[in-house]
Amino acid sequence: MDRALLIVEKENDGKPFELHTTYEDRALFYRKLMMPYLLLFLLFAALGLFTKMWGWFAAAAVFLFVCIVYLIDHLKMKKLSSLVEG
């Protein structure tokens, strides 16, 4: 399997570097960030159900909160993508 590396140099214009420049790219980025937290939520919730220990549910709630934050950002970017870019 061949791989290539593309190195891009940003021009020095005083603006910060942004990797995800379109709303669609940002939506995909937030979705990728959300998925591990969703899996951790499901894992800890299942552990809480099987062991009947509240500590697992508390940890699951933390992961669910982070997942919801990324989901909201994802949905905002999808909506902006359809309004602006589509």
Image (tube, rainbow, N blue to C red):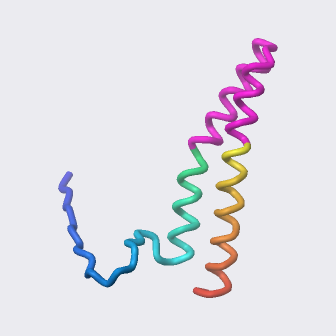
Magenta stretch secondary structure, dominant: helix
Residue 56 in magenta stretch: yes
Q: Residue visible at 62% across and 37% down?
A: 39
In the picture, measured across the screen, residue 84 lies left or right of residue 53, that is: left
- Name the residue rendered at 27%, 76% in the picture: 10
Q: Image point 19% across, 61% down: which residue? A: 4
Can you give x and y, in whole percent of width and height, for residue 54 in the image? 80, 19
Identify the image quadrant of the C terminus.
Answer: bottom right
- Give the residue drawn at x 62%, y 79%: 81
Q: Residue 34: x percent and y percent?
A: 60, 50
Along the viewing direction, whichever of 69 and 27 lies nearer the viewer = 69
Q: Position of residue 73 (x, y in %)?
A: 66, 63
First to last magenta residue range = 36-64
- Please tell me whether residue 50 belongs to the stretch shown in magenta: yes
Residue 25 is situated, as x and y percent measured from the top left of the image, at 50, 70
Q: Is residue 31 left or right of residue 5?
A: right
Q: Is residue 58 above or below residue 38?
A: above
